[in-house]
């Protein structure tokens, strides 16, 4: 079942490119993960629009200046000297900050960079890649770059959505539950006003 047309996607995310490819990928993913009503689809599309910059941002940006590293990870970079060792070096930074977490090996393993955030709702860490890969029957541990392509990016986001109970929260179609969805995705409420704008737009377009 297709719940989204290419024209509707373009109205919700005006800067999106490759809308034909994305429309198919999103419809396939939403159908597989029971995002099968206009209310559910509106909330899902609003969240991924914000998370991915309207489907443009599929990989975590780890290219930071030393000053920014100290702001983002103050405990890991307590001094400017420490931060300087990792600035503008994404592979080294990812391997360090995500080492021994989320199912990753140590810094030398390189897992932290290999399994950095990818997809529309960024999947992070070997354990999460493995869980999603098994559920979706995708070889994400050996081919993590699949999450940088529309089908894999959309499927992983829809899987995250369903597995965290976000369909049921979206069914309530109210601000408190949409805020709860944001917290489950973001860990906080970063970008909530923008997410709500996308949500209102998507509802106007999808709910007849």
Image: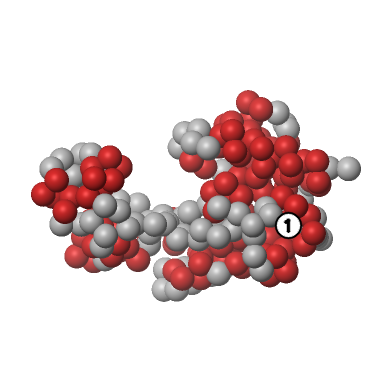
Assess disc 1: are there few (<14), some (14-19) or many (≥20) residues with their C-alpha within 10 Å of its C-alpha.
some
Q: Against 81, is 112 above or below? A: below
Q: Position of residue 28 (x, y in %)?
A: 71, 63
Can residue 127 be spotted in the picture?
Answer: no
Can residue 47 be spotted in the picture?
Answer: yes
Q: Against 153, is 190 above or below? A: above
Q: Position of residue 53 (x, y in %)?
A: 55, 52
**Which residue is identified by label 1?**
10
Circle 1: element type:
helix
Q: Position of residue 88 (x, y in %)?
A: 26, 60
- In screen coordinates, is 156 left or right of 8? left
The mark tally for this picture is 1
Residue located farthest toward the left when viewing the structure as drawn: 81
Q: Position of residue 197 (x, y in %)?
A: 66, 37
Residue located at (61% from left, 68% from top): 151
- In screen coordinates, is 105 left or right of 82? right
- Nearest the viewer among 98 and 131 is 98
Residue located at (73% from left, 32% from top): 173
- Nearest the viewer among 146 and 68 is 68
Residue located at (13% from left, 43% from top): 79
Residue located farthest toward the right when viewing the structure as drawn: 208
The quadrant of the image that shows the C terminus is top right
Quarter of the image where one finds residue 30? bottom right
């Amino acid at each position: 079942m297709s719940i989204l047309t290419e024209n509707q996607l373009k109205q919700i995310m005006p800067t999106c490119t490759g809308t034909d490819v994305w429309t198919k990928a999103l419809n396939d993913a939403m159908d597989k993960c029971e995002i099968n009503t206009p209310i559910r689809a509106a909330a899902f599309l609003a969240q991924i629009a914000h998370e991915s910059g309207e489907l443009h941002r599929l990989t975590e940006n780890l290219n930071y200046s030393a000053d920014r590293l100290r702001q983002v990870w103050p405990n890991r970079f307590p001094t400017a000297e420490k931060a300087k060792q990792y600035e503008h070096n994404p592979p080294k930074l990812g391997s360090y900050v995500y080492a021994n977490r989320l199912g990753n090996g140590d810094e030398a393993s390189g897992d932290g960079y290999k399994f950095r955030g990818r997809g529309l709702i960024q999947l992070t860490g070997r354990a999460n890649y493995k869980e999603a890969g098994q559920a979706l029957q995708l070889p994400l541990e050996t081919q993590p770059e699949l999450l940088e392509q529309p089908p894999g990016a959309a499927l992983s986001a829809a899987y995250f959505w369903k597995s965290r109970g976000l369909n049921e929260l979206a069914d309530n179609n109210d601000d408190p539950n949409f805020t709860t969805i944001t917290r489950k995705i973001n860990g906080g409420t970063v970008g909530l006003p923008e997410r709500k704008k996308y949500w209102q737009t998507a509802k106007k377009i999808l709910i007849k």
